[in-house]
Image (cartoon, rainbow, N blue to C red):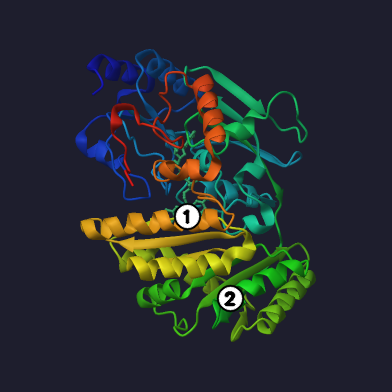
């Protein structure tokens, strides 16, 4: 509960209409993309770095928890306000400040929706490659705070590869600028990359300087249908070891295919174990065409029953329809899903998929598997109904087993969604006690009163003892 005098002070800082306290407003800010839920005491929507700085100064003085929030599309319950307090909604800070065509950079506020930025720079022939599937529903600040990836990161890398500089408001309200437009910069510690992926626990990102590259002129897409998943996996390795780096290689397993077909009626084959969607892009049409044909040949040679290469932009979009339909289709299959994002060495994908299928059988809960096969980042989605305690227990058991498999295969808990609240209990198994100790020391140095997104990322007791997930 936040005292009325503090609410008044917040209203004076940002304007009354940008401070929400009614129960119905607070409910709307209680969620992210998971099924977790906890109400904040107040939602504050600043419009500038200066306002964020003033809000943080007040929160620091009064020791009030602050949870930075973009579009709340996160899949790790990282922006759910576990201890109430202030939800700091960055979405009003949505200005693209400068597109620098000479230096290939864009400077933008943290609340810009990623697709809006990608569209704005594309109109100038420039390319911002990071493409989380939530590109239309997530913000640059959220992407940086989670170091978001996406299908294209196989060829182009993840968000951190494009963050050149940041403006960050620290827990006590001070403002720090890191990096800049310069390509080379080794002056001091690389604090830019410390804040990237810190999930709102070390500072509030208010502005970003992002690297751009020339916009590829051509893209060609192929769909390959594999009776055997092991063949699909071998195909991925054959493509990459042939020296070809497509922009994307997306995998869907049989449960995912069946779920999409049930929802969308796209005539997908129901008697196969895997479909790969592969896209090549580049500047030179002839080279891209040669590349996609070479990929199609490798697919056929490694056991694909059918390979379709899109000839037109419409055909290309049609091939992507199934991939884009995964999330909505899963939502029709079960009331809730836990979308995990383990990452394993690429060569371990067949073992990972086989082990997850076995978990699904053993625990008796449906798990759809899809993901970015080119970089080993899999999304096993456990489908369940949270109103049924038996199913909830099964979901927890399956998730813990999936994490165990990822680590056993030399992988990691999270390739792109982050730790948030969900994976905290498992982090130490992955990174070990010394890593945790170092994270704790960094956290203490930057946020000595533990007010920034407390109870996230780092394992340990949650202040107030109100953990979201007791696995
Ligand atoms: C359908 C769907 C598909 C998805 N696909 C992908 C995918 O392909 N790849 C991928 O990586 N993720 C994916 N995600 C997950 C999610 O979209 C990403 O994690 C995204 O980066 C979150 O951005 P957001 O603006 O919604 O952040 P939020 O969910 O609001 O916040 C996420 C975290 O970032 C922190 N944060 C937000 N803004 C700031 C800021 N300005 N300063 C400091 N901390 C901040 C929050 O405190 C929280 O810890 C998907 C989610 C959905 C629902």
Left or right? Give the position of 181 relative to 264.
Answer: right
* Image coords of residue 195 (percent x, y): 57, 32
Q: Is 256 or 327 nearer to us in this picture?
A: 256
Q: Is residue 275 visible?
A: yes
Q: Which residue is mark 2?
A: 230
* Image coords of residue 202 (percent x, y): 51, 28
> Which residue is pictured at 52% across the width and 56% down the height?
406
Q: Tags 1 and 2 in contact by the CB under 8 Å rule? A: no
Q: Is 291 or 60 nearer to us in this picture?
A: 60
* Image coords of residue 182 (percent x, y): 75, 32
Q: Which quadrant of the figure has residue 383?
A: bottom left
* Image coords of residue 78 (percent x, y): 41, 40
> Which residue is pictured at 45% across the width and 65% down the height?
356
Q: Which quadrant of the figure has residue 32?
A: top left
Q: Residue 85 — which label?
A: none
**Cα distance between the residues tagged 1 and 2:** 21 Å
Q: Which quadrant of the figure has residue 398?
A: bottom left
Quick one: SS at disc 2? helix
Left or right? Give the position of 35 relative to 212.
Answer: left
In the depicted structure, whether residue 374 falls above or below residue 131: below
Q: Is 420 or 64 nearer to us in this picture?
A: 420
In the depicted structure, whether residue 458 falls above or below residue 357: above
Q: Which residue is mark 1?
A: 404
Q: Is mark 2 within 8 Å of ligand 1?
A: no
Q: Earlier in the sequence, mark 1 or mark 2?
A: 2
> Which residue is pictured at 72% across the width and 66% down the height?
240
Q: Is 317 or 335 nearer to us in this picture?
A: 335
In the depicted structure, whether residue 11 falls above or below residue 236: above
């Amino acid at each position: 509960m936040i005292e009325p005098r503090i609410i008044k002070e917040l209203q004076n800082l940002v304007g009354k209409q940008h401070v929400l306290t009614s129960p119905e407003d607070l409910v709307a800010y209680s969620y992210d993309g998971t099924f977790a839920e906890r109400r904040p005491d107040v939602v504050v929507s600043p419009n500038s770095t200066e306002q964020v700085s003033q809000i943080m100064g007040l929160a620091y003085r009064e020791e009030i928890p602050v949870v930075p929030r973009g579009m709340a599309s996160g899949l790790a319950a990282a922006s759910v306000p576990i201890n109430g307090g202030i939800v700091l909604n960055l979405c009003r800070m949505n200005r693209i400040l400068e597109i620098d065509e000479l230096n290939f950079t864009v400077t933008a506020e943290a609340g810009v929706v990623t697709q809006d930025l990608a569209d704005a720079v594309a109109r100038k022939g420039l390319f911002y490659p990071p493409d989380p599937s939530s590109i239309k529903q997530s913000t640059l600040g959220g992407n940086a705070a989670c170091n978001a990836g996406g299908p294209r990161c196989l060829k182009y890398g993840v968000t951190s590869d494009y963050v050149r500089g940041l403006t960050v408001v620290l827990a006590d309200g001070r403002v720090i600028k890191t990096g800049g437009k310069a390509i080379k910069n080794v002056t001091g510690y690389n604090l830019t990359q410390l804040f990237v992926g810190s999930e709102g626990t070390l500072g509030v990102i208010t502005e970003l300087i992002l690297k751009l590259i020339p916009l590829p002129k051509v893209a060609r897409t192929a769909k390959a249908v594999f009776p055997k998943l092991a063949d699909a996996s071998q195909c991925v390795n054959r493509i990459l070891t042939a020296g070809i780096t497509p922009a994307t290689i997306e995998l869907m397993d049989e449960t995912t295919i069946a779920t999409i077909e049930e929802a969308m009626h796209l005539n997908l084959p129901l008697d196969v174990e895997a479909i790969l969607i592969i896209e090549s892009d580049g500047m030179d049409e002839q080279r891209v065409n040669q590349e996609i044909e070479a990929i199609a040949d490798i697919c056929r040679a490694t056991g694909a029953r059918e390979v379709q290469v899109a000839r037109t932009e419409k055909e290309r979009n049609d091939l992507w329809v199934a991939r884009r339909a995964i999330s909505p289709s899963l939502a029709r299959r079960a009331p809730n899903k836990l979308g995990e994002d383990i990452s394993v060495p690429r060569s371990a994908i067949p073992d990972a998929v086989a082990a997850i299928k076995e978990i699904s059988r053993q625990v008796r809960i449906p798990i759809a598997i899809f993901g970015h096969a080119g970089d080993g980042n899999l999304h096993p989605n456990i489908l369940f109904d949270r109103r049924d305690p038996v199913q909830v227990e099964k979901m927890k058991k399956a998730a813990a087993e999936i994490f165990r498999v990822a680590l056993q295969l030399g992988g990691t808990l999270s390739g792109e969604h982050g730790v948030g609240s969900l994976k905290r209990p498992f982090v130490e198994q992955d990174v070990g006690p010394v890593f945790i100790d170092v994270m704790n020391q960094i956290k203490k140095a930057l946020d000595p009163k533990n007010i920034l997104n407390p109870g996230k990322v780092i394992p340990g007791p949650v202040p107030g003892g109100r953990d979201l997930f007791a696995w």
